[in-house]
Structure formats: C-alpha cells, structure tokens
Amino acid sequence: MRTHPERYGAVLRVRPEYFEEYKRAHEAVWPEVLETISKCHIRNYSIYHHDGFLFSYLEYWGDDFAADMARMALDPATQRWWAYMEPMQAPLPSRGPGEWWAKMDEVFHHA
C-alpha cells in the first residue's frame, strides 16, 4: 500500500433545476456506495459547488487506480447511484474520451 496518496480533481456542471436534489442526495449517500468507495482505496473524497460547477477532490491510496475504478464500476449499488446522479449532471464538452467528470491537472500542492 502507498505511503502517500495520489490526488485527483475533476469538474462538471450540475443542472440548476437539480441542484437542491443533488445536495439532498449527498447529505445521505447510500451506505453501500460509501463502502465501495472505501474498498476502492479512496479517502478524503469531497465535492464542492460554485456557480453551477461541481469540483471533486479525492485521495487514492491503492496501487492500481484503473483496476479499482473498474471494480467500482461493476458494483450494482454504485451503478444505481450513478444512474440516479446522471440526469442531474452536465459533463463539460472539453472532457477527455471516456470521462464523465473532466479530469483536472494539479498545478499546486502544499503539504
């Protein structure tokens, strides 16, 4: 296991008509989804909002990010959660191939 995390930031838009529902849903994320996030070695996962944009930050403590993300994508509860969230979100046109949340490049970090 790692001695320090890989940090990830990503961004997308929240559809304004769904913002209140999105916030309510995230006040009570399904326990099985949170369990999968933890099992996939993600810690300190946060989502911030500003002016219609959602910014997500997470720390990955595992050894194979791609494998853990594939494992997460196969989880039935997570699939249902994503299906519930999808209509509320508006991905950026500039996102990379295969991305829903557009990955961001870290330009500064101070520990």
Image (tube, rainbow, N blue to C red):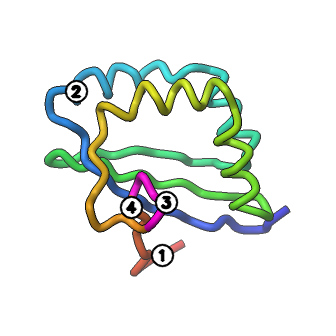
Q: Does residue 33 appear left or right of residue 1 in this picture?
A: left
CA–CA distance between discs 2 and 4? 20 Å
User: Farthest residue toward the front?
Assistant: 97
Mark 2: which amino acid? Tyr
Q: Determine which residue is flagged by label 4.
A: 102
Mark 1: which amino acid? His
Find residue 1 and report its horizontal and vertical position in percent. Answer: 85, 62
Quadrant of the snapshot with the C terminus: bottom right
User: Farthest residue toward the bottom?
Assistant: 107
Q: Helix, strand or loop at disc 3?
A: loop
Q: Determine which residue is flagged by label 3.
A: 98
Q: What residue is shown at x 46% (from left), y 29% (from top)?
A: 83
CA–CA distance between discs 3 and 1? 30 Å
Q: Nearer the viewer, residue 2 or 37?
A: 37
Q: Determine which residue is flagged by label 1.
A: 110
User: Within 10 angstroms of label 1, few (less than 14), some, or many (20 or more) residues?
Assistant: few
Find the magenta span and give its range. Answer: 97-101
